[in-house]
Image: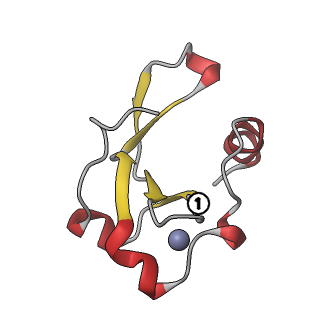
């Protein structure tokens, strides 16, 4: 990611790439919050297509979020109907 995208993630409280959930026991709890795009403050929170998806770990006590373009995203369920 570029510096602008990185700083935007920090403001929104997303974990940095280094903090992404790497615990394979959590993987069954992973889901996609925003698939192949993002909602950026810099464009008024409109959806912007991207190679990257926003993934969230729903494991209790974890809750990490990260952006990735890894192939496993296509195997994860969507979380777009889940609010809060
Ligand atoms: Zn996790």
**Quadrant of the frame with the N terminus:** bottom right
Residue behind label 1 places its C-beta within 8 angstroms of ligand 1: yes
Identify which residue, 43 or 79, lies in the foreground. Answer: 79
Q: How crowded is mark 1: few (under 14 residues within 10 Å), some or many (20 or more)?
A: some
Q: Position of residue 69 (x, y in %)?
A: 42, 63
Identify which residue, 10 or 21, lies in the foreground. Answer: 21
- In the rendered structure, the answer to whether residue 38 lies left or right of residue 61 reads left
Identify which residue, 51 or 62, lies in the foreground. Answer: 62
- In the rendered structure, the answer to whether residue 14 lies left or right of residue 31 reads right
Residue that appears at 26% across and 49% down: 78
Q: In this view, does 60 lie above or below 81?
A: below
Residue occupying the far bottom of the picture: 24
- In the rendered structure, the answer to whether residue 76 lies left or right of residue 40 reads left
**What colouring does the structure picture have?**
secondary structure
Q: Position of residue 32 (x, y in %)?
A: 35, 53
- In the rendered structure, the answer to whether residue 6 lies left or right of residue 58 reads right
Residue that appears at 47% across and 33% down: 84
Q: Position of residue 7 (x, y in %)?
A: 77, 42
Q: Position of residue 15 (x, y in %)?
A: 68, 57
Say which element carries label 1. loop
How many labels, in total?
1
Residue occupying the far front of the picture: 60
Residue that appears at 71% across and 43% down: 13
Residue that appears at 66% across and 49% down: 14
Identify which residue, 6 or 78, lies in the foreground. Answer: 78
Q: Mark 1 points at which residue?
A: 64
């Amino acid at each position: 990611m570029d510096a602008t995208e990185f700083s935007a993630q920090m403001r929104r409280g997303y974990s940095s790439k280094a903090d992404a959930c790497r615990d394979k026991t959590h993987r069954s709890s992973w889901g996609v919050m925003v698939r192949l795009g993002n909602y950026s403050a810099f464009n008024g929170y409109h959806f912007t297509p991207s190679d990257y998806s926003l993934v969230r770990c729903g494991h209790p006590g974890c809750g990490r979020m990260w952006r990735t373009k890894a192939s496993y995203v296509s195997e994860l369920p969507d979380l777009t109907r889940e609010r809060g």
